[in-house]
Image (tube, grey):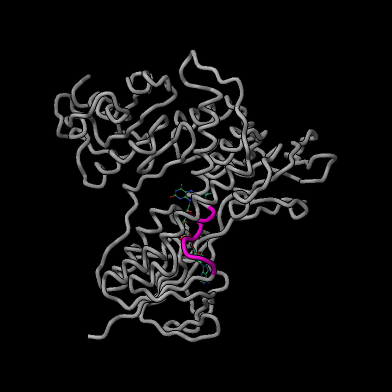
Amino acid sequence: MSTLRIAVIGGGAAGLSAAETAQRMGAATTLFERQRLGGECTWSGCVPSKALLAAAKTVHSIRVPAVPGITADSVSIDFEMIVEHVQNVIRDIARTESAEEYRKRGITVIEGEVHFASSRSLECGGEPYTFDRAIICTGSAPAIPPVPGIEEVPYVTNETVFGLKELPEKLLILGAGPIGLELGQAFRRLGSEVHIVDIASAILPMVAPEIRSILQSSLEEEGVAFHLSSKVSKIAKGDPYWLAFLGDDTDPVQFTHLLVAAGRSPRYGTLGLTELGVAVNRKGIVVDEGMRTSVDGIYAAGDVTGVMPLTHVAAYQARVAVAHALGKHRKATYSAIPWAIYTDPPVAGVGNYSEKEGETVLRRSYEHIDRAILENRLQGIMLCGLRGKPVLGKAGGGEIAWAQVAGIQADEVIHEFAMAMHTHAFAGRLAQAVHAYPTIALGIQQLVAQAFLGE
Ligand SMILES: Cc1cc2nc3c(=O)[nH]c(=O)nc-3n(C[C@H](O)[C@H](O)[C@H](O)COP(=O)(O)OP(=O)(O)OC[C@H]3O[C@@H](n4cnc5c(N)ncnc54)[C@H](O)[C@@H]3O)c2cc1C
């Protein structure tokens, strides 16, 4: 039997996972990357943003200790050194994803921009290549909204913000999504004045109002200014600051730096998909549950599909695509995939939040979780939606429909809900499982126990 040849286009989270999976499954694997392996997550996404947030959290914990009786006279910040640290962290992580590392594993890595020549061939650097199956993993780029005057401002995006040489004095962020919120908090804590503008009336529409209000009020307490239900109608050069006019407002927001974090555009424009007949929509390349595009033998995974643009989802979709391409009929499902926003406090969730009739919503404030009390970090809540009515005294029942947590360690403890949902373990099982004291995870056991044990 001849070995199937898999072409993986793009070496980010999806592409690296696709190449590793294909190679492990015995396919002859070629990975094409136009820039550098690692993609957005490593170079301009998860890694630098979390490293910057960690630096900002350190500053904040010195300036505003959670426990009374501690004061620090002053904190000095060397922004250039922090940026250098962030760049070092990127390099450390990128080292494990180098072309040499992947070649050592038996994967052919070719550097250059790819476009399709036919449904079984492509070109890279002027050279033709044929394949049996192709996995498109070309990611997404920051979307730039058509705000009048924006082209005049030397704005930054996630692709350039981690290379800033100076701390912005006044930072205006377009977009109150996860990126805007995380970077807004990081820069505020490091000393910038921060304004976040969004046309939506609330931050994070997919989360429960109680959860989002904990996050928004935490950021507001730290001095982040939100301008929601606000559209930037014009940007103009003032003296000495840039000016952003919101709607018909005549009192503009002044800024020195503009960060555009207003959504993502799938990156497939130069691949030649139209000629091939690959179907696309506003969000990205259209795929089915097996990550197949509309053209036989061509698959897509990661941000380019526009479905849950997260690193772990990209890697998961890539594994599904490769398995499917190699004859294993796996399907991608998203009902038990966790997400997190790494602010302080963090916010995390799994499943689709809803408060429907017939569902029970359980709530437990961090004020009743001993770990939060002893750390004096009481801002937080756990919510969990159960399908069907809980039966008191029956610890075996109750299916978890969704869960959301805001508060310290939310990004870690959400995995207990995710695991229960993934394995279809009933919520009653969580209530029965003994949890260590004093942990935030114990709050999960106490949360679900309310329904089953009548506590
Ligand atoms: C600031 C920020 C913070 C984030 N934080 C998190 C987080 O904490 N957790 C999380 O899960 N997600 C996070 N994300 C999202 C995460 O970064 C993306 O979901 C993930 O990187 C998508 O991976 P991908 O492989 O689909 O695309 P990418 O990582 O963008 O990779 C695509 C690759 O394809 C290459 N390419 C494109 N076109 C071609 C072509 N024609 N030929 C050859 N190569 C090509 C590109 O050069 C690139 O290397 C964050 C994103 C941002 C912007």
**Relative to 20, 300 lies left or right:** right
Name the chief secondary structure element in magenta. Answer: helix
**Relative to 418, 114 lies left or right:** right
Between 336 and 360, the one nearer to me in the picture? 336
Residue drawn 23% across the image and 31% down it = 389
* Quarter location, residue 269: bottom right
**Relative to 238, 376 lies left or right:** left
Residue drawn 32% across the image and 63% down it = 320
Q: How many labels does the image show?
A: 0
Which residue is outermost to the top? 69
In the image, residue 303 sits, relative to residue 346, either above or below, namely below
Residue drawn 32% across the image and 34% down it = 385
**Image location of residue 256, percent across then percent down:** 74, 41
Question: Is residue 42 highlighted in magenta?
Answer: yes
**Image location of residue 366, percent across then percent down:** 37, 23
**Image location of residue 443, percent across then percent down:** 30, 26
**Image location of residue 190, percent across then percent down:** 60, 34
Which residue is outermost to the right? 239
* Quarter location, residue 159: bottom right
Residue drawn 38% across the image and 39% down it = 349
**Image quadrant for the C terminus?**
top left
**Relative to 285, 26 lies left or right:** left
Question: Is residue 24 highlighted in magenta?
Answer: no
In the image, residue 399 sits, relative to residue 70, either above or below, namely below
The stretch of residues the image draws in magenta is: 35-44
**Image quadrant for the N terminus?**
bottom left
